[in-house]
Image (cartoon, rainbow, N blue to C red):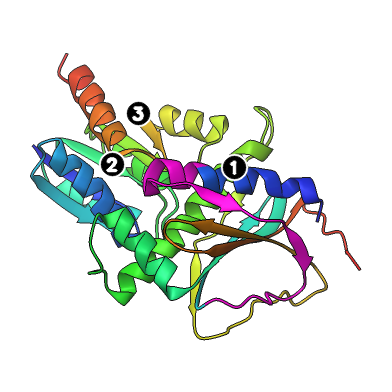
Amino acid sequence: MKVEFINPFIESVHKLFTTMLGCEAKRADAKLTRVSDNPRQITALIGLSGTARGTVALSFPMETAVAMANRLLGADNTVSDDSVSDAVGELVNIVAGGAKAMFCTESSVPIDLSLPNVIRGERHTVEFPSDAMWLDVPFTSDLGPFNLRVAFEMNGRKRRDN
Amino acid sequence: MKVLVVDDSAVMRKVIIGALSQAGFNDICQAADGQEAVTKVMAGDYGIVLMDWNMPNMSGLDALKAIRTNKSKVPIIMVTTEAEKSRIIDALKAGANNYIIKPFKPETIASKVGEVLAKASV
């Protein structure tokens, strides 16, 4: 994965936070990884296909996910488990959707999004079946820490990063 | 006025309904996919529809096309993460009255709905 491919996803995270969550998200240094070695308790994943392919994941400690769902809903620690999963799925959808638009020129075919999936569990890991690599970007925010993880290739090509 | 909010995310429906309520809309119904939206629009008397794009069973774009094929002129605003210009053009060509890209501020919902309803009443 080309490191510069991460920038639209980072920009999309910033826009999501300032527009709908009412705070800033601050990023730390990105790193390439094969397995998510900074396990969180809930991960939302979405697939990209068409003129590009890849996967975008947002992983949260449960406290961060609950805080984000509450902020989205304007609630105060009253969201249900289902609402937390639903909310993080929508967040990854928004991040991926915003980023994919930045890869498209006026004449190019849009990248397609899958429906989001949410994985919950203590110290779960997310791996690719092949040797593709994640670019992992840790963030901090007023709502708590989280990680953006992206595996992405343009034109349907999948470069092997050994 | 009766409003239909269509999104497969219950959280996003609540966010949009919250914005509409703040703008003074109280008669708000929900649908979780395009098929449910088509059924409700054809059976009900809605003043405006806010429609997501990527949903299971039937996409928002397909629902929009089905509603227009059924000769309904109900104003429809797409509310979606699909932000590419070509997607927006596809939706407008299919009969969408306006377009809101997620993420959005609550006031954007109110202003776009007001804009579309004002045009529809002319």
Residue pictured at 59% horizontal, 50% vertical? A112
Residue pictured at 15% horizontal, 35% vertical? B23
On screen, residue B107 above or below A117: above
| Residue A92: x %, y % from top left | 51, 58
What's the residue type where badge 2 is placed? Leu
| Residue A63: x %, y % from top left | 40, 72
Please provide the residue range marked out in magenta.
A15-40
- Verify whether residue A29 appears in magenta: yes
Q: Tag on residue A48?
A: none
Residue pictured at 38% horizontal, 39% vertical? B104
Q: Is label 3 in contact with label 2 (beta carbons under 8 Å)?
A: no
Front residue of B62 and A8: A8
Residue pictured at 44% horizontal, 42% vertical? A18
Categorize mark 1 by other alpha carbons within 10 Å: few (<14), some (14-19), many (20+).
Answer: some
Q: Tag on residue A11?
A: 1
List the residue tagged with mark 2: B50
On screen, residue A103 above or below B95: below
- CA–CA distance between discs 3 and 2? 10 Å
List the residue tagged with mark 3: B98
Categorize mark 3 by other alpha carbons within 10 Å: few (<14), some (14-19), many (20+).
Answer: some
